[in-house]
């Protein structure tokens, strides 16, 4: 074992930090800082992707021939950590980390030319149509039907939890092309333009006042057959490829670190009888335990990044990151709420651009905290619930 | 001991349940967000008609001379539908303080009972968190025959729909409780909503004139009256939380039977059965400690004994409320975090109930100081 970090990584970190400081507009970072929703403001996401693309950094983890930087896994990790702690907007995850990799791995040359440059440039937002009202955890039984008729597919069905569908130009959808085989085998991966006749989007009002997640209704939507990615019936395999591709993402390590640091700042400012909360025994104890959990999570991520030989199925390690990381998101947001006390109860309206100035009695950094804490209840639900993840661990690690 | 409701309490409970279930649908409650001061006018008239605002008012002042167990009976039902109307302010805090005031407040109590007056309590100040024993920075100064009031209050619950406000201040003889009409000169308010839809305001008093008879209590009497009112308010909030949790048990158990994944109702999965069972245990414990607190408040115990009981109950109920409201969302999956399902409303309501009159940290400190 060698626990030393390559010294060149610290040089790389400094270089990345300088570039971000140069490129990230202050007002964009402020919006992200006060952010209380699920996704960043779409315009910010696209503008930031464009800025990074000008540096050749918008999809650093992609293969070099498709516009990647050739950075190591550790360099990519450092890059993302720096973007997060500087409050850069989130990227369009669907494009850069989901659909993009599927297209460059399985898609035709025509599809690569058509989509990959747009994804790199942040030309438009794209959304993900996987979950359905009756099929969340049990995704394999999805029902949205795509029937081949000549040179097109006719799609009928309904998707849910589609982030920013109302602001997306394209969506990538899992659809059932063959109902007569076992559920996993009849699924295909289809690109659908969101302004196609028959596509209707409804924004879902959420617990935190935002409405970025949507329902998408597909009613006799005609999709050109060339929008199929890869082969018919392989959609499930591609979706699993996606999940295996991004094992450490579900730890939300960057967000967890950034929000814990924010909790530390809030605890220094908020006081009890004149003493900063950060200096009271009760909070010190609590924060120490959370810091220990956070540190363990980061080292679990590092083990994964360094490709440690692992006695168990690797998917069990990915699920472990998800179990620990999703619960930590909730623990840290609960900590922030307890630090703010009654101030956390005030409602800040959505969308953010309309957020009023709450006046001098209300510190600027309150905006978005409670909204974020409320939506954090979903962290143990999306991407496979806590219970599903535990089931995966029991099965894959122990054969139970 | 008899833990069953009395005949009168059963009548109160049943009529409350009928009205609340009929009137406070999810859609109706969501529509109240558009109402400027957040008050459900029709609902509040019924609060008055059914005598709910008279429970804690003494009979000789036109009330029902009820007890906190009666209030709890009603509050549990209000909690079961996340009702945010200003019952704690006008049905619990105001009657407690006004009926114990050194000057007669019979007229105002009559208006409260009739539903035409609503009274908020302005106590919290900037840069503190639940520091309820500290002297107030808001000052009541002698001026001619009366006084003037100056200072800044924060998070005054239910102020936007209130006709009057009771202000805690430091006066010539120490603590003071002062009654001010909301339309008095020298008041600036900044109103806003909380995450559960209830309303609050920050209120600035800038040399507001106060008549001598508007001082409701001062010195130790004011402190004692305030403590009693706050502890009653806290227990009312706890009763609402218990009602909310019990409603969530019904909602979630029904959902587990109805929602199917992997070809069967999700209630067949043992991991979810255990969550449901844990929620049941927490809710049961919460109701038990609520009864303990009620027994102290209604049983003629000393203020310190009451404070201890209320603090213990607040700690235990809050712990239960956190677990139950979080798991209720978990059991609903993505639907649980939408505004369109009841459990997200219960979550927000319980969050506000837990954070407005002292949180778990506050009650831990309070217990160690008793």
Image (cartoon, coloured by chain):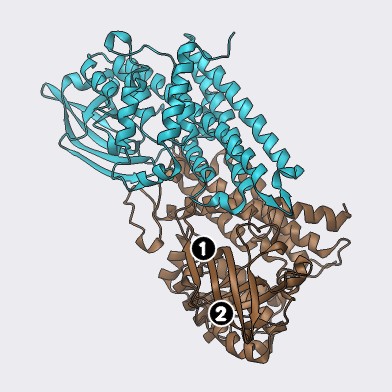
The residue depicted at 74 percent of the width and 43 percent of the height is B268
Split into 4 quadrants, where in the image is the N terminus of chain A?
bottom right
Residue at 71% x, 43% y: name it: B267
Q: Give B334 or A122, whichever is nearer the viewer.
A: B334
Q: With respect to residue A344, does A250 lie above or below?
A: below
What's the chain of the residue with tag 2?
Answer: A
B307 vs A144, nearest the viewer? A144
Q: Pinpoint residue B35: horizontal percent, then vertical percent.
A: 30, 45
- Residue A300 relative to residue B339: left or right: right
Q: In this structure image, what is the colour of chain A?
A: brown
Kind of element beneath mark 2 = strand
- The hue used for chain B is cyan
- Number of marks in the rendered image: 2
Residue A332 is at least partly visible in this image: yes
Residue A331 percent location from the top left of the image? 61, 48
The picture quadrant where one finds residue A326 is bottom right
**In the displayed image of the protein, which residue is found farthest to the front?**
A149
* Residue at x 72%, y 69% (from the top left corner): A179
Residues marked 1 and 2, same chain = yes
Q: Residue at x 49, y 20 (%)?
A: B307
Instruction: Please say if B68 is above or below B21.
Output: above
For numbered disc 1, what is the local secondary structure?
strand
Nearest to viewer (mark 1 / mark 2): 2
Q: Is residue A164 above or below residue B87?
A: below
Q: Residue under circle 1? A: A214
- State the residue lying farthest toward the left: B144
Circle 2 residue = A222
Near-viewer residue (B287 or B187)? B287
Query: Is residue B302 among the parts visible in the rendering?
Result: no
Query: Where B62 sits versus B233, above or below?
Result: above
């Amino acid at each position: 074992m060698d626990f030393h970090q390559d010294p060149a990584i610290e040089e790389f970190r400094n270089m990345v930090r300088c570039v971000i400081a140069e490129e990230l507009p202050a007002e964009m970072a402020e919006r992200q800082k006060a952010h209380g929703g699920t996704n960043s403001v779409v315009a910010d996401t696209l503008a930031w992707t464009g800025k990074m693309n000008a540096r050749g950094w918008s999809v650093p983890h992609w293969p070099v021939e498709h516009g990647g930087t050739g950075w190591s896994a550790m360099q990519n990790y450092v890059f993302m950590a720096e973007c997060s702690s500087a409050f850069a907007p989130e990227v369009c995850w669907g494009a850069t980390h989901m659909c993009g990799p599927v297209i460059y791995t399985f898609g035709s040359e025509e599809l690569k030319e058509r989509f990959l440059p747009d994804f790199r440039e942040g030309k438009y937002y794209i959304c993900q149509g996987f979950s359905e009202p009756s099929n969340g955890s049990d995704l394999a039984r999805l029902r949205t039907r795509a029937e081949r008729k000549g040179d097109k597919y006719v799609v009928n069905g309904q998707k849910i939890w589609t982030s920013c569908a109302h602001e997306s130009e394209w969506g990538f959808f899992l659809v059932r092309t063959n109902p007569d085989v076992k559920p996993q085998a009849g699924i295909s991966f289809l690109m659908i333009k969101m302004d196609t006749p028959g596509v209707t989007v409804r924004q879902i009002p959420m617990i935190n006042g935002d409405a970025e997640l949507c329902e998408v209704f597909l009613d006799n939507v005609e999709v050109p057959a060339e929008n199929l990615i890869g082969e018919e019936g392989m959609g499930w395999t591609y979706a699993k490829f996606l999940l295996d591709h991004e094992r450490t993402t579900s730890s939300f390590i960057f967000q967890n670190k950034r929000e814990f640091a924010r909790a530390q700042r809030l605890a220094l400012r908020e006081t009890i009888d004149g003493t900063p909360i950060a200096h009271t025994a009760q909070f010190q104890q609590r924060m120490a335990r959370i810091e220990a959990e956070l540190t363990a999570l980061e080292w679990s991520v590092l083990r994964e990044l360094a490709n440690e030989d692992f006695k168990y199925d690797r998917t069990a390690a990915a699920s472990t990151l998800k179990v620990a990381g999703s619960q930590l998101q909730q623990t840290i947001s609960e900590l922030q709420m307890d630090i703010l006390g009654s101030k956390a109860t005030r409602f800040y309206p959505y969308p953010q651009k309309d957020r009023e100035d709450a006046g001098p009695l209300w510190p600027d950094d309150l905006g978005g905290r409670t909204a974020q804490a409320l939506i954090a209840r979903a962290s143990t639900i999306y991407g496979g619930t806590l219970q599903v993840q535990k089931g995966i661990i029991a099965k894959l690690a122990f054969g139970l | 001991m008899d833990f069953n409701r009395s005949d009168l309490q059963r009548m109160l409970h049943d009529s409350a349940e009928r009205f609340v279930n009929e009137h406070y649908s999810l859609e109706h409650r969501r529509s109240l967000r558009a109402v400027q001061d957040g008050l459900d006018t029709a609902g509040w008239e019924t609060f008055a008609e059914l005598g709910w605002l008279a429970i804690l008012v003494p009979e000789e002042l036109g009330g029902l001379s009820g007890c906190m167990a009666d209030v709890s009976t009603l509050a549990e039902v209000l909690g079961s539908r996340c009702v945010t109307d200003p019952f704690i302010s006008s049905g619990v805090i105001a009657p407690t303080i006004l009926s114990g005031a050194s000057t007669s407040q019979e007229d105002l109590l009559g208006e409260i009972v009739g539903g035409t007056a609503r009274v908020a309590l302005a106590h919290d100040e900037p840069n503190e968190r639940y520091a309820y024993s500290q002297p107030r920075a808001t000052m009541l100064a002698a001026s001619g025959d009366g006084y003037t009031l100056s200072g800044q209050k924060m998070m005054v619950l239910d102020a936007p729909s209130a006709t009057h406000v009771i202000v805690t201040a430091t006066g010539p003889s120490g603590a003071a409780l002062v009654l001010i009409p909301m339309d008095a000169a020298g008041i600036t308010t900044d109103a806003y909503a909380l995450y559960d839809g209830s309303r609050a305001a920050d209120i600035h008093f800038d040399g507001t004139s106060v008549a001598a008879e508007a001082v409701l209590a001062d010195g130790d009497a004011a402190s004692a009256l305030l403590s009693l009112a706050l502890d009653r308010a806290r227990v009312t909030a706890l009763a609402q939380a218990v009602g909310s949790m019990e409603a969530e048990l019904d909602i979630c158990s029904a959902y587990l039977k109805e929602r199917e994944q992997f070809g069967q109702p999700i209630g067949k999965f043992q991991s979810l059965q255990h969550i449901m069972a844990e929620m049941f245990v927490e809710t049961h414990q919460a109701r038990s400690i609520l009864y303990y607190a009620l027994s102290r408040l209604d049983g003629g115990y000393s203020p310190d004994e009451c404070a201890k009981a209320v603090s213990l109950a607040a700690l235990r109920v809050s712990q239960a409320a956190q677990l139950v409201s979080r798991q209720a969302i978990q059991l609903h999956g993505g639907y649980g975090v939408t505004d369109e399902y009841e459990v997200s409303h219960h979550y927000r309501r319980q969050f506000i109930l837990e954070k407005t009159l002292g949180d778990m940290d506050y009650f831990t400190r309070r217990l160690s100081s008793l």
